């Protein structure tokens, strides 16, 4: 449902008054919620927002209209491209229902510890390895700046693996779900394996899949913004949401013939599979 902002007063030339009006509006709206039933149809993002989210209190995944366009989705694109784009996003949001936070809510949105102790321990053990992987990452742009300025690379800030673990789990699980879904789609068309899918523009199905995954993470930040996000953003930098994930996916090694000594090689014993 659309939100009515007519009560918000924007005063030209007075930023403080405008911000206070917005804050007053949000507070009044929140207080009104206390007296009424839960609106299960409420939107927490506008349709023109390129994003998606999982809401544990409603146990729902939401995809605003704006994300249903390239590079995430194109009705004219090859299936491998769409599965690695919007398919991985769908899988990511589903995965939030089973991450370090979503797993504390049940199917109706109540805070309930519905996992067994054994489940929780196994989950913690697997996530510990993923946290360690991300703790080792340093943004390439910040490393390059340190090298230009002659400052120690060891002093370049790292990704916070604990802060970003929920989103990293979502990325790893989401890409895995997307790949499984793509394989099921091929099977429905009579293609028994990804390797038998047609080659398009010289690229195999797996190559197209992983190139599409890489494409959705293209972006650019100022170094100052990159440093700030390392301290406050529960999402890892885009370069690691891309490359940090594929290092754990067996199909990536198959697609590009990655072998020991290559930049994205990860020893099989260190590869993490959450689900």
Image (spheres, grey):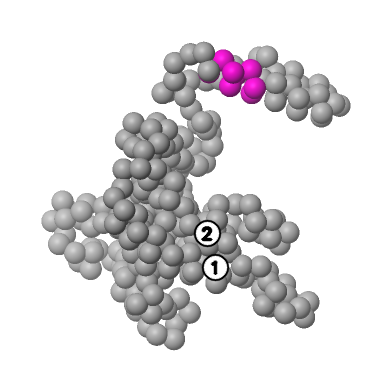
Q: Residue at x 15, y 51 (%)?
A: 188
Question: Which element carries disc 2, helix, strand or loop?
Answer: loop
Q: Can you identify the residue that label 1 sits on?
A: 135
Q: Is residue 82 left or right of residue 233?
A: left
Q: Residue at x 72, y 79 (%)?
A: 152
Q: Nearer the viewer, residue 52 or 212?
A: 52
Q: Could you tell me which quadrant the C terminus lies in?
A: bottom left
Magenta segment includes 29: yes
Residue 31, percent across and down?
59, 18
Badge 2: how crowded within 10 Å, few (<14), some, or many (20+)?
some
Q: Residue at x 41, y 77 (%)?
A: 266
Q: Which mark is residue 162?
A: 2
The quadrant where residue 208 appears = bottom left
The answer to whether residue 58 is visible is yes
The quadrant where residue 246 appears = bottom left
The number of callouts visible is 2
- Asked whether disc 1 touches disc 2, contact meaning CB atoms under 8 Å apart, the reply is yes
Magenta segment includes 105: no
Q: Residue at x 35, y 43 (%)?
A: 113
Residue 231, percent across and down?
65, 56
Residue 270, percent across and down?
39, 75
Residue range of the region highlighted in magenta in the rendering: 26-33
Q: Give the Cα separation between the discs numbered 1 and 2.
A: 8 Å
């Amino acid at each position: 449902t659309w939100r009515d902002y007519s009560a918000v007063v924007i005063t030209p030339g007075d930023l403080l008054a405008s911000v206070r009006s917005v804050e007053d509006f949000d507070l009044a709206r929140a207080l009104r919620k206390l007296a009424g039933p839960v609106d299960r149809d409420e939107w927490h993002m506008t349709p023109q927002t390129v994003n998606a989210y999982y809401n544990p209190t409603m146990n729902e995944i939401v995809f605003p209209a704006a994300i249903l366009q390239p590079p995430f989705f194109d009705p004219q694109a090859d299936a491998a491209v769409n599965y690695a784009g919007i398919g991985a996003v769908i899988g990511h949001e589903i995965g939030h229902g089973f991450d370090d936070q979503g797993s504390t809510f049940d199917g109706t949105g109540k805070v309930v510890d519905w996992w067994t102790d054994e489940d929780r321990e196994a989950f913690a053990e697997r996530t510990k390895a993923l946290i360690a992987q991300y703790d080792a990452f340093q943004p390439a742009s910040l490393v390059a700046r340190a090298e230009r300025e002659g400052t120690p690379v060891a002093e370049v800030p790292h990704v916070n693996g604990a802060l970003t673990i929920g989103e990293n789990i979502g990325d790893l699980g989401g890409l895995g779900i997307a790949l499984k879904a793509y394989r099921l789609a091929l099977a429905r068309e009579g293609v028994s394996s990804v390797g038998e899918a047609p080659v398009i523009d010289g690229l195999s199905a797996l190559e197209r899949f992983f190139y599409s995954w890489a494409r959705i993470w293209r972006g650019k930040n100022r170094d100052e913004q990159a440093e700030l996000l390392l301290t406050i953003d529960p999402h890892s930098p885009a370069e690691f949401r891309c490359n940090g994930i594929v290092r754990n996916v067996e199909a990536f090694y198959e697609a590009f013939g990655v072998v020991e000594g290559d930049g994205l090689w990860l020893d099989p014993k260190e590869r993490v599979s959450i689900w």
